[in-house]
Amino acid sequence: MRIFLAGASGVIGVRLIPLLVEQGHEVAGMTRSPGKVEMVSELGAEPVACDVYDAGALTAAVTGFHTELMMHQLTDLPDTADQISDFRDRNNRMRTEGTRNLISAMRAAGAERLIAQSIAWRPPAGGEAVEEHERLVLEAGGLVIEYGIFYGPGTYGGDRVPDHPRIHVDDAARRTVELLDAPSGVVVVAEEE
């Protein structure tokens, strides 16, 4: 399958690329950071440097790749957890406008599959953006994956195990790949309490 992975250089994206390629999928890995293009290529994906808010360039990239499945793993989060509240509006914009742009590009490419990350809890501020994001994905016939709080290498807490809902980021990636053929709906990917 030809999978366009938006958010390829993120904490879960870098884990998804090798798993998808290992299963024989062709992956275009989108990052907004030109400095991460080489890393995306080394992981096995065809790198795409693109900003999700540049709708024209995004549509050209998604259609040019002949995308069959759009995988939305985009967030706009800071490098350190103490800055999360400062990034709230940016991340909410990613969930709303970014999601709309990805869906529009996917439709232009004739892709019929959409998988998008979400969260298995509601933040104190921004819950409306999460709800809108999930509604957009479901209206497009897509699958919403509500992840627990990530832990493990490269995450905010590292190997410190957070409260529930939680999921080790490596397990989250593995379980995401298992959902490639899942029907439209909402799936929670978290450890059992």
Image (tube, rainbow, N blue to C red):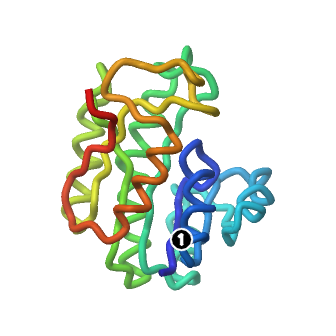
Q: In x, y percent, where is residue 187? A: 24, 50
Secondary structure of the residue carrying tag 1 is helix
The quadrant of the rendering that contains the C terminus is: top left
- Looking at the rendering, which quadrant does residue 82 occupy? top right
- Please name the amino acid that badge 1 sits on: Gly
Horizontal side, residue 186 vs residue 167: left or right: left
Looking at the image, how many numbered discs can be counted on the residues? 1
- In the image, residue 9 sits, relative to residue 139, either above or below, namely above
Residue at left 21%, top 52%? 186
Mark 1 neighbour density, 10 Å: few (under 14) some (14–19) many (20 or more): few
Point out the residue furthest to the front here: 192
Residue 90 against residue 46 in the figure, above or below: above
Q: Nearer the viewer, residue 142 or 182?
A: 182
Would you name the residue on which mark 1 appears?
Answer: 56
State the image coordinates of residue 136 (x, y, percent, origin top left).
25, 56
Q: Residue placed farthest to the top in the image?
A: 82
Q: Residue at x 38, y 84 (%)?
A: 110
Compared with 119, 30 (above or below) is: below
Looking at the image, which residue is at 38% across and 80% down?
Answer: 111
Q: Quadrant of residue 21?
A: bottom right
Give the left or right position of residue 106, taking residue 59 as reference: left
Q: Looking at the image, which residue is at 56% across and 62% down?
A: 19
Return the x and y of residue 58 as percentages of the image width and height: 54, 68
